[in-house]
Image: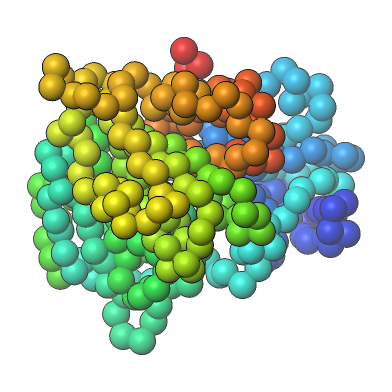
Amino acid sequence: MYTVLNQVSGKSFQCEGDETVLDGALNNGFNFPYGCQNGFCGQCKAVILNGEINYDGPTPEAITEEDRDANIALLCQCKAKSDLYIAVDELDSLANIQIRSMPCRVEEVNHLNHDVIQLILKIPGSQSLQYLAGQYLDIEHPDFEPRAFSIANAPVNSNLLELHVRLVEGGQFTNFVFNTLTEKTILRIEGPKGSFFLRDDSDCPIIFIAGGTGFGPIKAIIEHLILMNSTRTIHLYWGVRTEQDFYLNLPSEWNEKHANINYIPVLSEPGSSWTGKSGFVHEAVMNDFENLVDFEVYACGPPVMVKAAAKSCIENKLSKENFFSDSFEYANVSVSDD
Ligand SMILES: Cc1cc2nc3c(=O)[nH]c(=O)nc-3n(C[C@H](O)[C@H](O)[C@H](O)COP(=O)(O)OP(=O)(O)OC[C@H]3O[C@@H](n4cnc5c(N)ncnc54)[C@H](O)[C@@H]3O)c2cc1C
Ligand code: FES
């Protein structure tokens, strides 16, 4: 058992040598930032000021040469080998949010288009799930490893949870959802998880960049902003391949009803009748703004899109602290930079 002291908060916790430092922190109620928990997204990076850590395998890809020189580690993958002194900015907004495991019943299975299903899950009895709009949960089923899906509705009626599930070719769980899962099935969920949620201590305009079902958690955040009567300027860019890949008309309705919401759909493979923007969704954003100095950007979707969006946004003068993302990573696959 090792002691891990966070320089930023001055607080410490005990961590077993066989658990990751992130698990140790979360198990002790510390609100460290994280995303995929698979070693890909890099959101759990922290500086090791003193002490020894190691990884079970090779150093994860998300750790760059620069990170290594700066003693930066991935807390979701590393284990303590001595007492540690680290520096992590904890997320105060998560202070009252507890990760819980609970049963839920499949209430609705709605096919929204050719490869997206909307699942409505109901938490039985008087239980509910407290979460922040934008967070995700793990679905647990005895036949599968846990699978991460973002909650696509704002936390208003938090015993009903909406998920947008995209069919993955050859994917075990998503094929089960499309071909076998029926209403009334009992599943288990564990959550809420992740650090993708609205930072509401600012009034600056927001650019949302959604790729495919990355629209789900962004929908939850925008619904939350609407419910709070927020007047923040919102630019929502939703990118898919072809027109048939859009699966909800809600963004157009927001665009019509709310003067502060501007919706820009983007197709990467447009048909001849398409008159809107085309190309990669992050490129559409860069074409529309001279620079991003005054913005916050929230990006969510496939890893390649999120990486490209982060790079372009920072190059266009977005402050690193104002880029928030959720990358739909999947286990045991690395994503190349190109
Ligand atoms: C934090 C987080 C939130 C997520 N939220 C959502 C969400 O709201 N909606 C959603 O549709 N997905 C979401 N995902 C992705 C989702 O978890 C995966 O698509 C799902 O786990 C695939 O499970 P499977 O059993 O069908 O595929 P597997 O059987 O695990 O994989 C089969 C094959 O497909 C590949 N693969 C797996 N997932 C993907 C993928 N996403 N894209 C391309 N190839 C893939 C694998 O490399 C493998 O070769 C999220 C992921 C993370 C980490
Ligand atoms: S790399 Fe650690 S949470 Fe994603």
157 sits left or right of 175 in the view? right
Q: Nearer the viewer, residue 55 or 291?
A: 291
Which quadrant is home to the N terminus? Answer: bottom right
Q: Residue at x 40, y 53 (%)?
A: 259
Asked where in the image residue 5 lies, by quadrant, the reply is bottom right
Q: Residue at x 23, y 58 (%)?
A: 119
Q: Nearer the viewer, residue 120 or 322?
A: 322
Residue 330 can be seen in this image: no
Q: Nearer the viewer, residue 263 or 156?
A: 263
The image shows a total of numbered marks equal to 0
Asked where in the image residue 140 lies, by quadrant, the reply is bottom left
In the figure, 94 relative to 38: above or below? below
Residue lying farthest front? Answer: 259
Q: Residue at x 57, y 24 (%)?
A: 290
State the image coordinates of residue 31 (x, y, percent, origin top left): 67, 59
State the image coordinates of residue 260 (x, y, percent, origin top left): 44, 52
